[in-house]
Image (cartoon, rainbow, N blue to C red):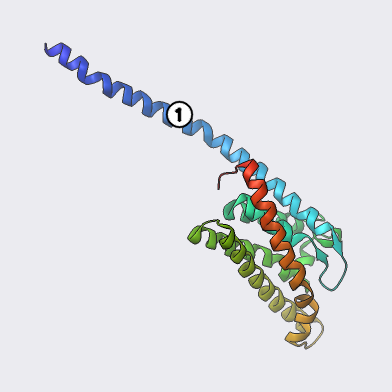
Amino acid sequence: MTILQNLCYNKPANKKTKGIKMNNTTTVKNRPQNKTRDMVYISFFAIVIAIGSWISIPTMIPFTLQTFAVFITVGILGGKRGAAAVSLYILLGVVGIPVFAGFKGGIGVLLGNTGGYILGFLLTVLVMWGIEKLFGKKTVTLFFSMILGLIVCYAFGTAWFITVYMRTSGNIGVMTVLSWCVIPFILPDLVKIALAILVSKRVSRYTKIEN
């Protein structure tokens, strides 16, 4: 009777233990796959941002699809992987690969007058990531996170432009810089935001990328 009781008592425990081992094994096996998948996503969207920068109309600050590409990157990948993709894009440019507007590359582009707007993309993504973590990824939340991220990019880029310009060329007014680098882009950037939300939501339905 004692032996039978012991066998009955041990069976569920053994099954449970086996289940735990199987789950742990599955988790360990999935980790390399998840990392590889993330690397592919991040690399792909870094290339998408580069392509967006190449499609440009030359002006003081070139009209490009960079902003659109940054927005869809975060909209589809989420803040964490989006930040990694933008960081990779900037790093590629820093080492000299011509991923910036006008097929330019090198640290000199970032240190120039307009380099702050490129670095501002990373701030945009970080703002969007923070809002995503606090409020989720509903369409309204995504819209306002893009607006706020864009404002931060404008502010940082404008401050950078003024600082570099004053060191190299002399005094310049804030309104002058805004008229060159911000005001002409407001309406096009709002259109990009609307399109980015539409594209992000459509793509997310089919790819089902987990954030």
- Name the residue tied to disc 1: 25
Measured from the top left, where is residue 38 in percent x and y? 61, 43
Inspect this view and state whether residue 85 appears: no
Measured from the top left, where is residue 109 in percent x and y? 79, 66
- Observer-nearest residue: 52 or 39? 52
Mark 1: give few (<14), some (14-19) or many (20+) Cα within 10 Å.
few
Residue 21 falls in which quadrant of the image?
top left
Residue 117 falls in which quadrant of the image?
bottom right
Measured from the top left, where is residue 103 in percent x and y? 85, 58
Q: Would you say 42 lies left or right of 137 here?
A: right
Q: Residue at x 74, y 55 (%)?
A: 49
Element type where label 1 sits in the image? helix
Inspect this view and state whether residue 10 appears: yes
Q: Would you say 40 lies left or right of 25 here?
A: right
Q: Quadrant of the N terminus?
A: top left
Q: Amino acid at mark 1?
A: Thr
Say above or below: 77 vs 29.
Answer: below
Measured from the top left, where is residue 143 in percent x and y? 62, 63
Residue 62 falls in which quadrant of the image?
bottom right
- Observer-nearest residue: 63 or 85? 63
